[in-house]
Image (spheres, rainbow, N blue to C red):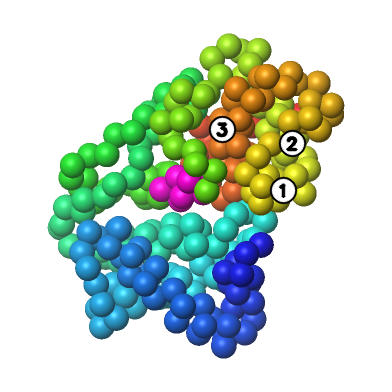
């Protein structure tokens, strides 16, 4: 857990920690507003108040074992801002830049499809999926993994898909190994091969895919996880 994550946990119980967390991340909060509304905001506008409340809410709901705090806060803030815009009946076109998911991961259908202008969605689930994708994109960036990489790196043969799901399952049953993976940004291939029997070359070839599956299934991404139901079923055996 990094220093920001620790402070977010402390903020649940200590008001002074919450004040420090907000003070240190005002620029981040303003960035979230811009990414959602495509408009610059300041501390005197309603959107900023909504975003501050959402940031505090994210701290109260944050679970360190599910991932880092800032990507989670990013999702919560964007949800609240979109809800606020709807309640205010603002009929505006909100240009956004999320990745879209076509098909599902196991079918190698991950695509980048940024629309020039995306009308504010009417489906809450559609919103949530987009922000989950945005959040996991930030997580995968820490591993230098993009969704383009996943499209190329996803297993095609059923035998290979099963092996990759089994590899992801090894992490899900070994929480300490997930923490090590996040710290070192590598897979412990020798140990995994010894304990799972999965060929090392298979895991090397599909390293990025395995990491992405682990982060999604171990994180707070319910809509993305739905695209991985067959993988999850195999992984949790």
Q: Mark 1 to mark 3: distance in Å?
A: 16 Å
Residue 180 circle label: 1
Residue at image mark 2: 188
- Between the residue at mark 1 and the residue at mark 2, the CA separation in whole angstroms equals 9 Å
Q: Position of residue 203 (x, y in %)?
A: 66, 25
Residue 65 x/y as whole percent:
67, 56
Q: Quadrant of the C terminus?
A: top right
Q: Secondary structure at mark 1?
A: helix
Residue 213 appearing in the image: no
Q: Residue 234 in the image: x percent, y percent?
A: 69, 26
Q: Which residue is mark 3?
A: 208
Q: Are marks 1 and 2 in contact (CB under 8 Å)?
A: yes
Query: Along the polypeptide, which appears first: circle 1 or circle 2?
Result: 1
The residue positioned 62% from the left and 84% from the top of the image is 14
Query: Looking at the image, is mark 1 or mark 3 earlier in the sequence?
Result: 1
Instruction: Examine the rendered structure and indicate whether residue 76 appears above or below residue 160.
Output: below
Callout 3: SS: helix
């Amino acid at each position: 857990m990094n220093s920001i994550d620790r402070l977010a946990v402390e903020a649940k119980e200590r008001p002074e920690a919450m004040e420090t967390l907000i003070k240190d991340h005002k620029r981040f909060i303003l960035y979230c507003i811009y990414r959602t509304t495509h408009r610059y905001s300041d501390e005197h506008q309603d959107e900023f108040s909504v975003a501050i409340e959402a940031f505090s809410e994210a701290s109260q709901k944050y679970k360190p074992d599910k991932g880092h705090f800032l990507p989670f806060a990013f999702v919560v803030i964007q949800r609240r801002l979109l809800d606020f815009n709807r309640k205010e009946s603002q009929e505006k076109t909100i240009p956004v830049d999320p990745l879209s998911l076509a098909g599902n991961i196991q079918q190698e259908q991950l695509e980048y499809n940024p629309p020039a202008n995306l009308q504010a969605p009417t489906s809450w689930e559609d919103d949530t999926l987009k922000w989950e994708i945005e959040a996991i994109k930030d997580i995968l960036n820490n591993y230098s993994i993009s969704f383009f990489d996943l499209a190329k790196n996803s297993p095609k043969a059923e035998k290979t898909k099963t092996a990759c799901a089994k590899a992801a399952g090894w992490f899900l049953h070994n929480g300490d190994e997930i923490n090590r993976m996040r710290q070192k940004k590598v897979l412990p291939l020798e140990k995994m091969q010894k304990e799972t029997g999965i060929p090392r070359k298979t895991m090397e070839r599909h390293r990025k895919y395995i990491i992405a599956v682990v982060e999604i299934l171990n994180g707070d991404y319910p809509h993305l996880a739905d695209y991985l139901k067959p993988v999850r079923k195999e992984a949790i055996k």
